[in-house]
Every structure is written in structure tokens, then in C-alpha cells.
Image (cartoon, rainbow, N blue to C red):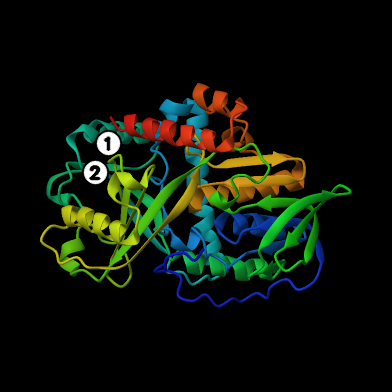
Amino acid sequence: MSQPPSYWLRSDEYVYPPLQGDASCGVAVIGGGIAGLSTALHLSRRGAKVILLERDTIGHGSTGRCGGLLSQSSAFELSELLSRFGNKRGLDIYRSILKAIREMAATVRDNNIECDLEQTNGYFVATEKAHIPAIEEELETLKDYGYEGRLVTGDELPVAGAFAALCKPGDYALDPARFAKGLGSVIAAHAAIHEHTGVARIRNLNGKVVLVTDSGAQVTSDHVVIATNGKTLNAGMNALAAPFVSYIAITEPLPAAATEKLGNAGLWDANFNYYYVRRLPDGGMMIGGNHTWRSTLGLESVAGVAAHLRSVLMRYFPGTDIRIRTAWKGDIALPPDALPNVETKGNKTLLIVDGMIPGWIAGGMAADRFLTGRSAYDYLYDARRDMGFAANLLRRMPAPRSLKILAMRVGLGLKLFFSHW
């Protein structure tokens, strides 16, 4: 099925030839998004023989359709992590996020990847009075652990309708599609990449993994890493995840005066519906978010996405002529605790992530596991981790997968809802 167009994806032309004949390698990576690219990069840098297979083109899926924000606020605030996972694990998760941001920015700079990378501030904004205590708590928590942040109120607020905001330095923004293609160029110096090469099935043979492509060519490898997000939730693994709808809209360029206070910073709304905003290099605004149910906000169609997100932007920038030039939506996969999910079973590893930072982390974990047998992040993101009583019970139940996914969507939606109140 073809996907709606993305602002970032300027061409569907492929750079790397489809696989024509049989091949062999140490690790086969399925998926040319951020998780697959991170896996291939971390492996090839350390001498592993890697073949990466992508059904479409590098960055064609959710990576080339995301917001391009490398933000500390993209998953959880530090105070929420400490509350949900305890002080040690919560702090280690937060540190892993910051480390991934630094590594991704350094990779761009060290390899001269042209993807409009710029360092920005990040705003975590309370658009309802009920969210102000969460903003204040996060600021105090950051200070307690030696991190920077400041409270913004009154005329300094970056958007209209906000009651308070937490401003944090150290975020980045980039063009995610060009970043992905740049990573592909770095990887291709040490590994093989084949675009327009879909994998029809995976089988085991004499201790090896054999990938049979749509054309009938075969790749025989010691290990396979499956990094195709929601498209392979049933890849013979036990990882528990459910699809959420993710959506983005891009406006025509707005008057500079309308967005002057926001500048080039990223914005994350503390509202339950999870909106994020950034100004693009050409003066347009990007707004995105995700939600458990499409029908809740009229998101069944791209036109519905555009209309809904335009109405949100009108609240942020009232009195501004806002015209949507493009919008898109699609399913992403989310584990019960919304953290990266890395499951290894024998000679297969499955990565389920939402976002560029989790994808980068998961790829590094997959590489570590193949090369050394373990990752320092195993206790944070392994698929067998404690995800809470309900999720642990659901994971063990002999129910059909479709019912598990339905139950998880309801449960995770309620969890996210009540965490905002």
C-alpha cells in the first residue's frame, strides 16, 4: 500500500541496487529506517559483515515521515521517569536519551551529513492550568540532578494560550530523510545496502537464518535484526506492542512575527493528545502528534489530520493565516510502557521503537548483543523487562494476538490519559 507523501521525502529514486543473487553475511538487517540504520552503523563500525535490506528506499517509512526533533521531551520528562521506574532506572533511561542525542549530532558533524542540523532549545508547555504543577515538578527535578532548565511565563511564552513552559537547552532539529540517507552513505562504505528488496519470509537452516526476498534471492546470515516497526509485530516473536496512529501537517511559510517567540525551538504540549511543533528552515510550521484511536479526533483521513492540526495551530498562533500544504499519517508500534523494545530469541532480534532517539538506542543494543552477547542497556529496554502487572499478565496469556493488541491499546491509552491528570 502506498503511503501519503512526506515533506521530507523529495524523491523515491533509489541509490542502492536491489539484491539480484544470493549473498551471505554475519548480520542481515531488515529495514532502512533509523533503527535498522543504527544497527548497521554500529555493527559495521566494529567490523561485522552486514547486509541491510529495505523494501522501498532508505528512510521511506516512519523515519522519513517523523518530525525530525531530537528532544529530551520526546518521550518522558525526568520526573515522570523517576516516578514510573524508580530513581536508578529512571535516571539511567534519561541519561541514555541524552547520550543518544549527543551521538546522533556528533555522527552528523563527523561525517558531514547535510541534513540541516541545528541546536535548539526545547519547550515543554502547559496549555492547561492543571499541567502547571507537572512543569514545576520537572524543573525542580532537573535542578536536583544537575540539569539545566528555566521556567517561562507571561510575555516570554512561545505560543498563545499557554500558562507556563519549561525551557531546556541541548535539543536538535534536522531533516530526518536526509539524515537517514546520509547514514546510508556512511554505512555503505563498510556494508552492503539493497533498496527495493522486500523480505518475503525468514527461515532457519542448519543454524543459520535464511531470508528469502520477494524476487527469490536469498541472504544467509548468522543473525537477523528485524527493524520494520509496526509492519512486523507478528514476526514470530513474543514482544508485546500495539499500533498507534501518528500524524503530521506542514503549513505554508508563516509571517516571522507570528513565530518570533518560538524561534527555531521545538515545542511539546503537555496536553494528553501529545502535540509537538517546530519551525522549518523555509518559515513553515510542522505540527505532529499521535493518538490511540483515529476516530477520537477525526483522523481517519489525511484531510481530517490537516483540519485537526490546523485548528491546534490556530490556538497557538491566533490571528495568523495558516494554510496546510501537506499532511500525512500512519501507524507506529508502541510497547506497553512506551519505551524501546529489544527482543532477542536465538538468532533473531526484533526492534520495536517509536521515534528517532529510541531507534538509535535500540540499534546500538542490537549491535552490542550480536558482538558481545549483551548490552549495557539490557535492563532498561529488554523485551522481558517488568512492564507492570497488567502488561506482564497479558504477555503470558494464551490469547490471540489480535485480542492482546486490542487490550493493550485500551490499557495504554488509559495509562497515558490518567498520567496527564
Type of the residue with mark 2: Ala
Mark sitting earlier along the chain (1/2): 1
- Residue 191 is left or right of residue 82, and the answer is right
Q: The C terminus lies in which quarter of the figure?
A: top left
Tell me where residue 85 appears, x and y as whole percent.
48, 27
What label does residue 135 carry, if any?
Answer: 1
Q: Is residue 313 visible?
A: yes
Where residue 143 appears, x then y in whole percent? 35, 34
Q: Quadrant of residue 281?
A: bottom left
Tell me the number on the disc at residue 165: 2
Q: Residue at x 21, y 68 (%)?
A: 254
Name the residue located 67 percent from the left edge and 63 percent from the top edge.
53
Q: Nearer the viewer, residue 360 or 240?
A: 240
With 204 as the anchor, is 177 left or right in this view?
left
Q: Secondary structure at mark 2?
A: strand
Q: Are marks 1 and 2 in contact (CB under 8 Å)?
A: yes
Q: Is residue 363 left or right of residue 74?
A: right
Mark linked to residue 302? none
Label 2 Cα crowd, 10 Å radius (few <14 / some 14-19 / many 20+)? many
Mark 1 belongs to which amino acid?
A: Ile
* Relative image position of residue 344 (x, y in whole percent): 69, 41
The relative height of residue 17 versus residue 48 in the rendered view (above or below) is below
Is 255 situated left or right of 24 in this image?
A: left
Whether 310 is drawn above or below 379: the answer is: below
| Residue at 44% over, 55% down | 330
Residue in the image at 52% along x and 70% along y = 113
The span from disc 1 to disc 2 (Cα, nearest Å) is 7 Å
